[in-house]
Image (cartoon, rainbow, N blue to C red):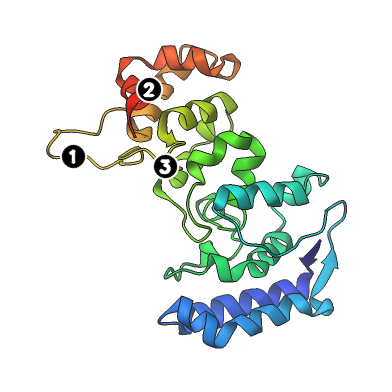
Amino acid sequence: MKRFNKEGNKKFISLMKNDFLINSSNPPDDFKRKYKSKFQDLIKDEKNLENLEQSGELNYKKFENRFEFGKYITSVLKNCSFSKINRDEGLWNYISCFFLEDFISSSSKNNRYLWMPKWHDTKRLLARTPWLLYYINKDNSLFALCTPLNEHSNMCEQFVSRQELLRNPSIGELCHKLYYDPKTKKLKKNAAKHEKDKKLDGWHSGVIHPRLTGKLGKLYKIYDLWSLNTSDLEKLIGEEFKHWNHKS
């Protein structure tokens, strides 16, 4: 596949940041009417591109959700060095531009479409986060990526924001088991509801944040959670989380 060279990357950032995002009152509509061809011209012009070594061929296709997208991007980049592509601005901006029509939403936030180096922004880049979650957690990333390509969900935000969750595969498997409903192919109701509920006089029982994150934070001080499997973790987190096994 290709990536933006220095000149192509500058053109993409300028078109996105200094034109499209500040001049669009209705991003989805304006993209289709005025900007789609401009962005496509960037990835068609070989002067803006260079080859990405060890990568596979990137083809445009439609995806059911962010999980399927992340799985596909992982397969294209499977032979690439993680350290070389992880923070490759030209690569992630190219992928963002390549699939841009599927990423566009009512949001006009730069960090949804443009590579930005600070983690607060990087984790919200729609082109990259599905790849990162699938790369680390494989099929167990589905619970955080079961939304359309243009939606960075509350669950995804809460999970990817915390390295102790994101990078521990056993915790990823635990979250998938607790919060994803394979029958509906969606999250279980209120699984990502982190606001206090006045009716309950507190948080919903067993939600990922702050209940699971708080529990795991305490367990990290006592156990080596990196060495435990998912069944062990499930026993340690206690009774509060068992109701998710019967909830949809």
- Give the secondary structure at mark 1: loop
State which quarter of the image contains the N terminus: bottom right
Nearest the camera: 182 or 74?
Answer: 182
Answer left or right for 220 relative to 48.
Answer: left
Task: Name the residue rendered at 51%, 55% in the picture.
Answer: 124
Query: Given contact means CB atoms under 8 Å apart, are the residues at marks 1 and 3 in contact?
Result: no
Q: Nearer the viewer, mark 2 or mark 3?
A: 3
Q: Nearer the viewer, mark 1 or mark 3?
A: 3
Residue 25 % position (x, y): 40, 82
Q: Nearer the viewer, mark 2 or mark 1?
A: 1
Q: Which residue is disc 2 drawn over? A: 215
Query: Given contact means CB atoms under 8 Å apart, are the residues at marks 2 and 1 in contact?
Result: no
Amino acid type, mark 3: Thr
Using the image, determine if residue 154 lies above or below residue 241: below
Q: Which residue is disc 3 drawn over? A: 184
Task: Name the residue rendered at 83%, 53% in the picture.
Answer: 55
Residue 52 % position (x, y): 83, 59
- Residue 161 visible (yes or no): no
Looking at the image, the residue that sits furthest to the bottom is 34
Amino acid type, mark 2: Lys
Q: Mark 3, residues whose alpha carbon is within 10 Å: few (<14), some, or many (≥20)? A: few
Label whose residue precedes the other's in the sequence (2 or 1): 1
Q: How many marks?
A: 3
Label whose residue precedes the other's in the sequence (1 or 3): 3
Q: Which residue is disc 1 drawn over? A: 197
Answer left or right for 240 relative to 200.
Answer: right
Looking at the image, the residue that sits furthest to the front is 183
Label whose residue precedes the other's in the sequence (2 or 3): 3
**Separation of marks 2 and 3 at Cα, in angstroms:** 28 Å
**Separation of marks 1 and 3 at Cα, in angstroms:** 25 Å
Nearest the camera: 14 or 169?
Answer: 169
